[in-house]
Image (spheres, rainbow, N blue to C red):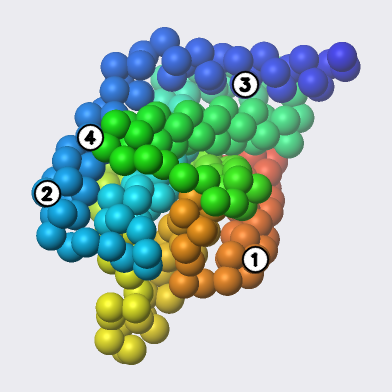
Amino acid sequence: MNQNTTQFLTLVRREILRFVRRPYNTFLPPIITNALYFSVFGVILGSRIGEIAGVSYLQFVLPGLVVLGAISDSFENASFTIFHGRWNDYIQAVLTSPMSNRSMVAAYVSASALRGVVTSLLIVGVGLIFTPVPVANPVYLVSFLLVITTLFGGLGVIGGLWASDFDYLTVMNQFILRPLVFFGAVFYSLEVLPAFWRNVSLLNPMVYMVNGVRYGMIGVTEIDPNTSLAVLTGTTVVVLSIDYMLFRRGYGLAE
C-alpha cells in the first residue's frame, strides 16, 4: 500500500468515525422522519389513492424518500465537516499534510457518499415494515445511488467552502435541496400534471434522480434511465473537478 492510499484511507476512516460515533444525530432522525412519511403518505393517504403505475402508492413514493435521505445526508456530511473544520481551524492539519488535493477531495466525498448510501438502506429498512420492497433492476439502483450520493457529496464540499456561517448550510439543505426533491415527482406521477407543469418539472434535476432510483426499485420510470444516468454521471465529474480546483486554489481554506 503506497503513501497516498494510506493517507486517503486514514482521512476516510476519520470522517466515517465522525458520523458513526453519533448515530442519534446522524441516523436516528431520518429513521423517525421516514417512519412518519410512510405512516401518513403511505398508509393513511395511500389507501385512498390506490395504485400508481401498477404498484401501491407506498411502493411508488419509497424511491423518492430514498433519494431525499441520500442527498440530504451526503450533502450535509460533506458541507458540515468542511465548514466545521474551517470554523475550528482543524482542517489545517489536513491541508498541511503531504496529501494531494485530489486525495483530500476523494476522501471527503467518499465518506459523505457512504453516509448517504447507509441512510438509503435505513430508509429501505423502515419501508420494509410497511410494504414489500422490490428491486427490479439492481444494477440501475446501485448505479444511481452511487452517482447521486457522490454528486451531492461533491456539492457539499462546495457548500462547506462557500458558507461563511452555519445558517448558510441550513438554508442550502432545508430551503433549496429538500423543496427541489419534494417537487421532483416523489409523491405524484408526472402523468397527472398538465402539459405545462410537466415540462416545468422536467427542468428540476431531482425528477431524473427520483425516476432513476424508482426504475431500479420497482421498474417504473417516466424518463429514460440511461440518459438520466449519463447526464448525472457527467455532472458529477464536473462537480468533482470544481472541488479539486477549489482545494488547489485554497478557496475558503485560507484567510
Provide residue 156's location: percent of width, then percent of height: 48, 42
Provide residue 58's location: percent of width, then percent of height: 28, 50
Question: Which residue carries the number 1 mark?
Answer: 226
Q: Earlier along the polypeptide chain: callout 2 or callout 1?
A: 2
Badge 1 element:
helix
Question: Which residue carries the number 3 mark?
Answer: 12
13 to 172, vertically: above or below: above
50 to 190, vertically: above or below: above
Q: In which quarter of the image is residue 244?
A: top right
Distance Cα–Cα, label 4 vs label 2: 13 Å
Distance Cα–Cα, label 3 vs label 1: 31 Å
**Quick one: 48 or 98, which is closer to the camera?**
48
Provide residue 251's location: percent of width, then percent of height: 57, 43
Badge 3 element:
helix
Nearer to us of marks 3 and 4 is 4
Nearer to us of marks 3 and 1 is 1
Q: Earlier along the polypeptide chain: callout 3 or callout 4?
A: 3
Distance Cα–Cα, label 2 vs label 1: 34 Å
Q: Residues at badges 4 and 2 in contact (C-beta under 8 Å)?
A: no
What residue is shown at x 68% (from left), y 54% (from top)? 237
Q: Is residue 168 visible?
A: no
**Quick one: 11 or 160, which is closer to the camera?**
11
**Quick one: 207 or 159, which is closer to the camera?**
207
Q: Residues within 10 Å of mark 1 (few under 14, many from 20)?
A: few
Residue type beneath disc 2:
Ile
Q: Earlier along the polypeptide chain: callout 3 or callout 1?
A: 3
Q: Can residue 28 be seen in this view?
A: yes
- Residue 15 as seen in the image, left or right of residue 21: right
